[in-house]
Image (tube, rainbow, N blue to C red):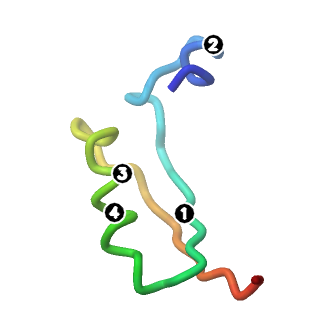
Amino acid sequence: MAALEQAGSSLQDVVGTRVILTDIDNWKQAIEARKPYCLDAAPSIRSWRSTAS
């Protein structure tokens, strides 16, 4: 959030997020971790599974 504030912005201005998971089975936890920051609006989310070790 500090980076948003430094740019004169806020969470209300976020329109999308990107999540990269090394274990796709953790997608529910990733969504839950994001929820407190997206209470007023739900930005679009893109998720990828990383196959890199």
Crowd around label 2: few <14 · some 14–19 · many ≥20 (10 Å): few
Q: Report the disc number at residue 31.
A: 4
Left or right: 31 in relation to 13? left
> Circle 4 sits in a helix, a strand or a loop, which is it?
helix
Report the residue marked by disc 2: 6
Task: Give the secondary structure at mark 3.
Answer: helix
Label 1 and label 3: CA atoms lie apart by 10 Å
Measure the C-alpha gap from mark 2 to mark 3: 21 Å
Check disc 4 and give the amino acid type.
Ile
Q: Residue at x 28, y 59 (%)?
A: 32
Tags 2 and 3 touching, CB below 8 Å = no
The location of residue 12, given as percent across then percent down, is 38, 28
Residue 39 place in picture, x, y as percent? 22, 39
Q: Dots 3 and 4: beta carbons under 8 Å?
A: yes
Instruction: Tell me where residue 6 sits by quadrant.
Output: top right
Q: Quadrant of the C terminus?
A: bottom right
In which image quadrant can residue 4 be found? top right
Marks 4 & 1, CB-CB < 8 Å contact? no
Secondary structure, mark 1, is: strand
Sequence-wise, the earlier of marks 2 and 1 is 2
On residue 34, the disc is 3
Q: Amino acid at mark 1?
A: Val
| Tag 3: amino acid | Arg
Closest to the observer, 44 or 33: 33
